[in-house]
Amino acid sequence: MDSRRVAVLCNFEKSEAKSACQTAVRWLKKNRIGAVTSADSGALRSCEFAVVLGGDGTMLRFARA
């Protein structure tokens, strides 16, 4: 795996978001891109960009992180 990393953040209480998150993480790993699924600020700093799956509340929650 190279140094590229993407944050994939979701509301795990929503089954569709959880499924999409798992699919995205599998695709990233298959393409040798690191996936961060934690809103830990240290981990997020190492990411090139973030994908947030859920609703408006989920996006606002992770925007604060």
Image (cartoon, grey):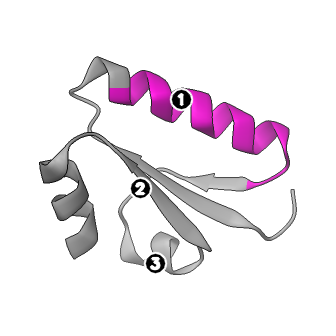
Q: Taking 18 as reference, is 20 left or right? A: right
**Residue corresponding to mark 2:** 38
Q: Residue furthest front?
A: 56
Q: CA distance from mark 1 to mark 3?
A: 22 Å
Q: Range of the magenta residues? A: 17-33
Residue 32 position within the rendered picture, expressed as x and y whole percent measured from the top left: 85, 50
In the rendered image, residue 15 lying in the magenta stretch gets the answer no
Residue 3 position within the rendered picture, expressed as x and y whole percent measured from the top left: 80, 71
Mark 1 vs 2: CB contact within 8 A:
no
User: As displayed, is residue 49 above or below residue 55?
Assistant: below
- Residue type at mark 1 is Gln
**Residue corresponding to mark 3:** 42
Q: Nearer the viewer, mark 1 or mark 2?
A: 1
Quadrant in which residue 54 is drawn: top left
Q: Taking 53 as reference, is 11 left or right? A: left
- Residue type at mark 2 is Ser
- Residue 2 visible to an observer of this rendering: yes
Tell me what residue is drawn at x 35 percent, y 62 percent: 39
Tell me what residue is drawn at x 38 percent, y 27 percent: 18
**Residue corresponding to mark 1:** 22
Disc with the residue nearer the chain's start (1 vs 2): 1
Residue 61 position within the rendered picture, expressed as x and y whole percent measured from the top left: 17, 61
**Residue 12 - label:** none
Mark 1 vs 3: CB contact within 8 A:
no
Quadrant in the picture for the N terminus: bottom right
- Residue 65 visible to an observer of this rendering: no
Q: Main secondary structure of the magenta part?
A: helix
Q: Nearer the viewer, residue 30 or 1?
A: 30
